[in-house]
Amino acid sequence: MPTDLENAYFAGLLDGEGSVALKRSHDLHRKHNHYYPSVTITNTHKGVCDLAKEIYGGCVYERKSPSRNGYKPLFDWLLSSRMADGFLRLVLPYLIIKKEQAQLVLTFYEFSLNCT
């Protein structure tokens, strides 16, 4: 279980270097859309993303971009669905900039789970 300090730290990173989104996927068998939360934090220090993965799970990807010649590589830490939901609930009290967005995503996701 993450500590309050870790939750506050990663809330700050999410506010400044991250994104909260509601993604859509289409189920071809049931012929309907499914919505799920997604969280991404981008950083040039791989250790930050690796620590997030160690504490909260998810995946770390290095961006391969030819337009970044001469710049440090970028790393994305990504969470989706239930893992993103759990993370957002842990960091929500510490969010400032993305608090309203996170609340909307959590509400919509909870509503969509109750409708299926």
Image (cartoon, rainbow, N blue to C red):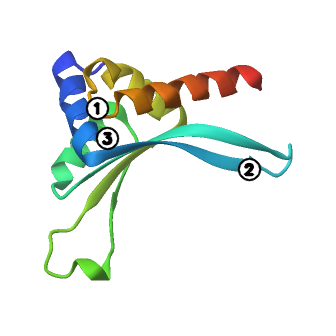
Residue 55's tag is 1
The reply, left or right, for residue 12 in relation to residue 88 is left
In the foreground, 48 or 115: 115
**Is the residue 109 above or below the residue 41 in the image?**
above
Instruction: Give the CA distance from mark 2 to mark 3.
Output: 27 Å
Residue 115's tag is none
**Is the residue 46 above or below the residue 54 in the image?**
below
**Which quadrant: the N terminus?**
top left
- Residue 16 in the image: x percent, y percent? 22, 43
The reply, left or right, for residue 74 in relation to residue 63 is left
Closest to the camera, between mark 2 and mark 3, is 2
In the foreground, 52 or 40: 40
The reply to whether callout 2 and callout 3 are in contact (CB within 8 Å) is no
Instruction: Give the CA distance from mark 1 to mark 2.
Output: 30 Å
Q: Which residue is mark 3?
A: 53
Label 1 amino acid?
Answer: Ile
Residue drawn at x 32%, y 76% is 65
Q: Which residue is mark 2?
A: 26
Of mark 1 and mark 2, the one earlier in the sequence is 2
Label 2 amino acid?
Answer: His
Secondary-structure class at tag 1: helix
Label 3 amino acid?
Answer: Lys
Secondary-structure class at tag 2: strand
Of mark 2 and mark 3, the one earlier in the sequence is 2
Instruction: Give the CA distance from mark 1 to mark 3.
Output: 6 Å
The reply to whether callout 1 and callout 3 are in contact (CB within 8 Å) is yes
Residue drawn at x 75%, y 23% is 115
- Residue 107 in the image: x percent, y percent? 55, 23
